[in-house]
Amino acid sequence: MRHAGCRGKPAISLPWLNDKPRPESPGALWTGLIPQRRGAGEARRVPPPSLDRRSRRGLPFPEHGMTRARQTVLMLGAVLVTLALGLGLTVATVRLENQAIAIRFARLADLVSGRVQQRMIQHVALLRATASYFDAGTQPVTVPEFARYVAGLDLRGDYQGIQGIGFAALLSAAEAGRAHDLIAAAHGRRVAARPPSDQALVGPIAMLEPLDERNLHAIGYDMYSEPARREAMAAALGTGEPRATGPVELVQEITSDKQAGFLIYVPTRAGLFGMRPRRDGGFVYAPFRAGDLHAAVLATLPDLPLRLRTVDVLAPDQPLFDNSSAKIPASLAAHAITREISVAGRRWQMTMTPTAEFSGWMNHSASLMVGVLSLLLVIAVGGATWNFIRALAEAERAAALSGREAEQRALLLREMQHRIKNHLARIQAIARQTMRSANDLPEFGRIFGARLSAMAKAQDAINRDGRDSADLRELLLGEIGGVVDAARAEAMLAGPPVRLNGREAQALGLVAYELSTNAMKYGADADALTIRIEWHVDRRGTADWLVLDWIEPEALPGGTDDSSSGFGTQLIHALIEGDLTGSFSREFGEGGMVITIAFPLSLT
């Protein structure tokens, strides 16, 4: 495909192209036209040590950053430390609050027991004063006198809790009948001696004020006949001091609303009116309903958040007072406080248990606040730690991305160097061979410039859509558009859409240029030029092959140089067979010349 007249002419001397001598074999001659690819033995460039597979996946480096396990440990550690601190503060606050609650309840228990003790001291003092009133007179106190005396004391107003004040004479059993007659006459009613007794002494109730229905029922009752009362009366006589009984049921309990009761006796020398005085005259005494007594004491205090149970130490099975309506839970019973007081020679045990209201959540407001603040602190620390870990991970990912971009830039630079090197080698080879085939410098410039233009058009087709590939139809239109108009060039092409990579586009562009130039050189002029370019894709083994037929109907065997030593033929063979590892064939027939080019496609 060379000019016939160009063979054997001396080459043009261009010093900048005269480098080392080239071998004459076609394969070696066109080595510079083929873009050099890395061989199997060429060492693969290893990425910088700071970039490994983990960095390319966007993962943190174990040696330079935090692994997920370390992040988890850091976050859990911060949360657990904060949680432990908050829990410790909350527990300490709860303990302090419990201590404060215990102290407050102890003070409340002291207040209640002190009030009961003080009330009993007042009642005993009243009985002592009454006994002195009896002892001060020269004559026995009569019922009207005693009634006026007690009325002046205002027991219901100033001494709540006491059932009344009375006098019981101590007489021999032989005097019991006369005593009951005198008592009945004094009260203007019949009084029966009761209960039956086998004791040598009797202690009938002669006076009891205020004389309401309950107390009236007790007039004439022999208190000495009952063991608990007799024991207290004997103790009072023996010591000369006020003495109380254990829990008893008062004679005044005439309704269904019964309460435990007790009595306090103070000895007096005064005897029963109308009878000869004895050495042991009798007793000033007071009956108490224990429930009313405690209710009167508790009424002087605000609504107390406690349960109170009072028992006589010597008779604990019969409580004097118990305001617990249900069984006290063990959690509250554990905080119960016990106090003992002395009541006229007896020991009372008062057990006070806090209610749920006393130790409710309102009393733990500080610990609740500390707990909530601790929880918020844990959440804040956890969130801050999580944000820190995320920021750290983002920084590591940014560093990895920056490293990958640097590696990609380096790779692009190396690729650019490789491509520039190939382009320069191809240009140098084209220039060298053009120099050998050209007759003079102007012809060299024209041919060399046209071939460079063909390379540029192929490069434009590759870079047109930014995908480093070219459309086959656009590539061929660009190459043959220089010899025919655009409409005719479009009509010459027939085939499906095919995309070529950069190497394939460069090679096929030069081939199309050589073939179109050869058609113009040895065929008709541009207006009469008829070319058909047809292509299709074949599946050969595991690869897709492009099969392109260049058909020149008017070309004749004698009209073109088919020597294998021509520059165009050598160039096409080097590009198709050497660079693209394909095949090139040319046949002449009745339909003209048919050139068939086939090579495997890299892009499918």
Image (cartoon, helix red, strand yellow):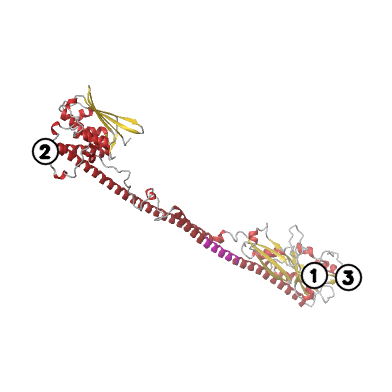
> Label 2: which residue?
442
Q: Amino acid at mark 2?
A: Pro
Q: x%, y% of residue 206?
A: 80, 69
Whether residue 294 sits left or right of residue 528 in the image: it is: right
Q: CA distance from mark 3 to mark 1?
A: 21 Å
Secondary structure character of the magenta stretch overall: helix
Tell me how far mark 2 sits from mark 3, CA to CA. Answer: 175 Å
Q: Counting other residues with Cα less than 10 Å from the Cα at mark 2, is it few (<14), some (14-19), or many (20 or more)?
A: few
Q: Considering depth in this image, is 87 or 347 the residue closer to the camera?
A: 87
Q: Position of residue 187 (x, y in %)?
A: 80, 66
Classify 210 as above or below 578.
below
Residue 119 visible in the current orientation: no
**How many other residues sit within 10 Å of disc 1, few (<14), some (14-19) or many (≥20)?**
some
Residue pointed to by mark 3: 174
Q: Nearer the viewer, mark 2 or mark 1?
A: 2
- The image position of residue 96, as x and y in percent, is 56, 65
Residue pictured at 19% horizontal, 43% vertical: 21
The residue beneath circle 1 is: 231
Residue 188 coordinates in the image, percent (x, y): 81, 65
The answer to whether residue 500 shows anywhere in this view is yes
Q: Earlier in the sequence, mark 2 or mark 1?
A: 1
Given residues 233 and 65, the one toward you in this image is 65
Instruction: Please state the extent of the stretch shown in magenta in the rendering.
Output: 87-102
* Type of amino acid under label 3: Ala
Position above or below: 555 against 337: above
Residue most extreme to the front:
24
Judge left or right: residue 449 versus residue 351.
left
